[in-house]
Amino acid sequence: MYGLVNQAIQGLVIDNHGEEAWGRIKARAGVEEEAFLSNTIYDDSVTYSLAGAAAEELGVSLSDVLIGFGKYWVLRVGKEKYGALMMAGGSTFGEFLINLPNFHSRVMLIYTDITPPEFKVEETGEGAYLLHYYSTRPGLTPFMQGLLEGLSELYGAQSQIRCTGSRADGLDHDIFEIALV
C-alpha cells in the first residue's frame, strides 16, 4: 500500500492516543521506519502489522481499529487532501454511492501503481443500496464499513450500514446493505 495509508494510521493513533502510543505500536509491529513517504509503496504486511499492533496496544478488536481507521480516512485524510476529488463524486451520499464504481479511476490518475478495489452498486429502492465490494486484500471488510460510515457523516446523511455477506462467509466479495433514513 502507499505510504499515505500508513501515514493515516499514524495520524489516527497520534490524534487519539498520542505520540507515545504510536511509538509502542510501531515497536510492537516491528516497524522501524521513522516516517512513511506518501508516494512510496510499502508491503501490505506493514499496514496489517500496524493495525494488529494498534488493536493489541489499545485493547480493542482489530475490527474496531479498522472501522475507526475507515472513518478517519474519509473525515480527516480524504477531506483534507482530496476534498475536491471526493466531492466530485456527488452532492449527496446516495449520489456518491452510485458514482463509487468510477471513483478509483480518478484516484489512479494520482497513484498510478494503486491496486484499487472494485465496486458494483445496486439501487434497490428509495434511498436503499447494495454495495458489492471486491478487493484483492483480505480482511478489510471492517475498514470498508468505516469508510461508508465516514462518507455518510461527511455528506450529513443518516444511514444504516451493515455487511450482509462477506468473503468470510465463502463469497468472493463483501456485500453491504445501505439504507438512508
Image (cartoon, rainbow, N blue to C red):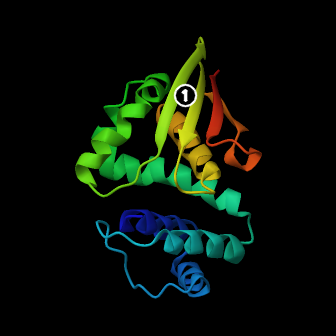
Which residue is label 1 attached to? Answer: 157
At 45% across and 68% down in the image, what residue appears?
A: 6
Residue most extreme to the top: 126
Please tell me which residue is depicted at 55% across the width and 21% down the height of the picture: 122
Q: Position of residue 160 (x, y in %)?
A: 67, 30
Q: Of the residues shown, which amino acid type is indicated by label 1?
A: Ala
Where in the figure is residue 126, as x and y percent of width and height?
59, 11
Residue at screen point 54% across, 49% down = 71
Point out the residue furthest to the left here. Answer: 109
The residue closer to the viewer here, 165 or 125, is: 165
132 over 30 or under it: above or below = above
Give the image quarter of residue 50.
bottom right
SS class, disc 1: loop
Graded by Cα atoms within 10 Å as few (under 14), some (14 to 19) or many (20 or more), the crowding at tag 1 reads some
| Number of marks in picture | 1
Q: Quadrant location of residue 103?
A: top left
> Does any portion of residue 152 appear in the rendered image?
yes
The quarter of the picture where the C terminus appears is: top right
Q: Quadrant of the N terminus?
A: bottom left
x and y, in percent, of residue 15 in the image: 51, 66
The residue at 54%/75% (across/down) is 18
- Using residue 85 as the reference point, say whether residue 152 is left or right of it: right
Left or right, residue 90 beside residue 60 = left
Q: Is residue 162 above or below residue 16?
A: above
User: Does residue 14 appear in this view?
Assistant: no
Residue 57: percent from left, percent from top: 68, 77
Which picture quadrant has residue 98? Answer: top left
- Going by the image, does 176 lie left or right of 83? right
